[in-house]
Amino acid sequence: MPITVLLVDDHPVVRTGLRALFEHNEEVEVVGEAASGEEAVALSGHLHPDVVLCDLRLGASMDGVDTTVALRAQQPAPAVIILTTFDRDVEIIRAIEAGAAGYLLKDVAPATIISSLREAAAGGMVLAPEMTQRVVEGMRKPRIRLTDRELEVLRLLDQGASNREIARALFVTEATVKTHLVHLFAKLNVESRAKAVTLARETGLI
């Protein structure tokens, strides 16, 4: 029997291209398409695909990592392969920690995608050798742990908000905002708002 696959990408042209890739391959059957994480979870619960081939960035909806977590919680749980253009270590590690069976870049050869689907459907893990080494090294590094409120402050910093604007958005005093910033800077080991935002983007915190 062919491997049943659900395609998840917010760009219709990508889904069309992937469907065309599998169209004449007897090993793979595309059973559905989704444009968002929420749609993917709903369709997977109905269609029960063997593998979900999912983009990492899905517009304003759940991202690929959140979608992976939700998919892996289903019974039966499909294998999930992230197919994306982003190859930062933090993105790869987040996906693997969420339960993804693989992480592929969109410039891989079509044959690699098909063999990866086969491997994932059989319960295996799909990572390029160089990615495997990066994941191992990344997981050995200490992780930056921020509270939910610190993450909220960080996101507002990323939007260019002043202390007063942050205080208003979070319904706290400016003194409380300053305290959060002190803790943020210490945890991130930075000395300015700009460096905090830059590091947060680089490490996938925001």
Image (cartoon, rainbow, N blue to C red):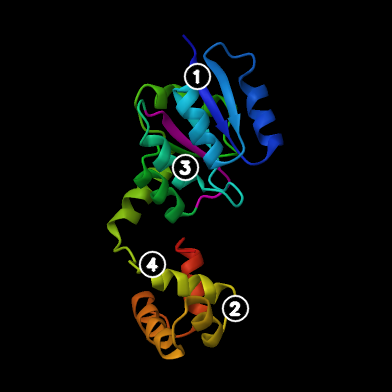
Alpha carbon distance from label 1 to label 2: 45 Å
Instruction: Give the crowd class for mark 2: few <14, some 14-19, many >=20 residues within 10 Å.
Output: some
Write down the residue under mark 4: 148
Residue 4 is labelled as 1
Whether 30 is among the magenta residues is no
Q: Amino acid at mark 4?
A: Asp
Q: Could you tell me how far apart the alpha carbons at marks 2 and 4 are, in whole angstroms? A: 19 Å
Identify the secondary structure beneath mark 4. Answer: helix
Disc 3 versus disc 1: distance between alpha carbons?
A: 18 Å
Question: From what the image shows, is residue 174 above or below residue 137?
Answer: below
Residue at image point 41% right, 33% down: 126
Q: Earlier in the sequence, mark 3 or mark 2?
A: 3
Q: Position of residue 173 (x, y in %)?
A: 44, 87
Residue depicted at 59% across the width and 39% down the height = 106
Pick whichever of labels 3 and 1 is earlier in the sequence. 1
Closer to viewer: mark 3 or mark 1: 3
The amino acid type, in three-letter code, at marker 1 is Thr
Residue name at image x 52 percent, y 24 percent? 5
Q: Earlier in the sequence, mark 4 or mark 1?
A: 1
Q: How many marks?
A: 4
Task: Check disc 3: other Cα within 10 Å, few if <14, some if 14-19, many if 20+.
Answer: many
Q: Which residue is mark 2?
A: 160
In the picture of the structure, the residue carrying the numbered disc 3 is 67
Q: Which mark is residue 100?
A: none
